[in-house]
Image (cartoon, rainbow, N blue to C red):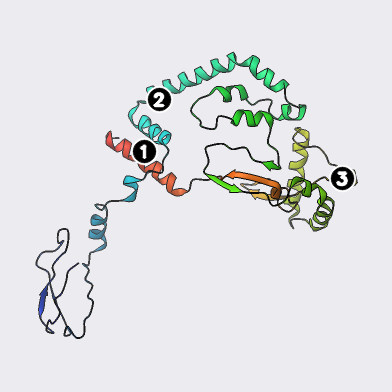
Amino acid sequence: MGDLNAGSSAGEEVPLAYNRGECPCSNVQFILEQRQTTENCTDWVFGVCWSPENFLKKAVLVWHLFKEFSGLLPEAKLACEKLASWSYEDLVNWRCKKLGEWLRLVKSLQAEEVEIKNRMPSARKHILEKKRIALMRHLKGYDDHTLADDIERGFSLVGDRPMSSVLPPKLVPATISEEDLHRHSDKASKALRYMTRSSGDDELDQGLWTKILSEVDEGWMLGPLPWDDLPMGAAVSRRFPLPQSGKVRPIDDLSQGQVNSTVNTYEQATVDGPDVICSYATYLMRCLEERGL
């Protein structure tokens, strides 16, 4: 960017003086087609025209944000560096070694795993039967040290959410108490019953019903239950179908029945966006490039 002196005469050639960097074109002069005076000042902005090809050549030489991107976790960066530096044989051997360590640990924890499952109610034990909770408790490298304990105890749909110490803190307090939920549940459930309608797609409705019955068969749910058999104070929530990749995904809406309103949360669940995925790919390619791959 250059500066022009005020008072230049129309038609006068004025050299362009660059404030910083190197001038991409030498001996550039501009001819002013109107008079520039101190009484009538005008701001002039100059640019250099490039062909698309030359512009691209210049653009790739400019500093880019991804070169200093720090959004990747240290573990992800280390994984990229190992993938780029290790041979295929080294990678396979390391994975086999790590899996072998875990399998030996699973075998040594069998008695503890049985004890954990025996402490559970039968419904929870059935759901978590194949989960290696003792193994999860003894594995290192994840900062949520109480996750295995939380899974063993189960998660309540109302009240306080357990803290992971991994997610960013954010307090979202409950707006009603559990007592209020049960006190008003009969009226709320009756209103919800008459508000519930078909999705408008018979195939989706049938797919949802089939999915619900399969969850009953697997022991994940109880039912079907007659409406009049529900106990006093039971909180009812609506379930609706969502088509996803050719399948029907059941979605439980716990907001309408006010179940979600009783929950105190202390952390914010976060999901990485495409910028993190791109930075991961960029960092991996840079690690490969440094090794001539």
Disc 2 crowd rating (10 Å Cα; few below 14, some 14-19, many 20+) is some
User: Mark 3 or mark 1, which is nearer the start of the sequence?
Assistant: 3
Q: Mark 1–mark 2 contact, CB under 8 Å?
A: no
The residue to which callout 2 is attached is 91
For the residue pair 224 and 256, the one nearer the viewer reads as 256
Q: Mark 1–mark 3 contact, CB under 8 Å?
A: no
Residue 257: x %, y % from top left: 75, 51
The residue to which callout 3 is attached is 232
Q: Give the left or right position of residue 87, taking residue 186 as reference.
A: left
Q: Residue at x 75, y 37 (%)?
A: 214
Amino acid type, callout 1: Leu
User: Mark 2 or mark 1, which is nearer the start of the sequence?
Assistant: 2
Q: Residue at x 14, y 63 (%)?
A: 25
Q: Give the left or right position of residue 9, taking residue 99 as reference.
A: left
Instruction: Report the quarter where the C terminus lies.
Output: top left
Determine the secondary structure under disc 3: loop
The residue mark sitting in front, 1 or 3, is 3
Amino acid type, callout 3: Met
Residue 292: x %, y % from top left: 27, 35
For the residue pair 270 and 10, the one nearer the viewer reads as 270
**Which label is found at residue 170?**
none
Q: Give the left or right position of residue 291, taking residue 128 as reference.
A: left
* Cα distance between the residues tagged 1 and 3: 58 Å
Q: Is residue 79 above or below residue 268?
A: above
* Cα distance between the residues tagged 1 and 2: 15 Å
Determine the secondary structure under disc 2: helix
- View extreme (right): residue: 228
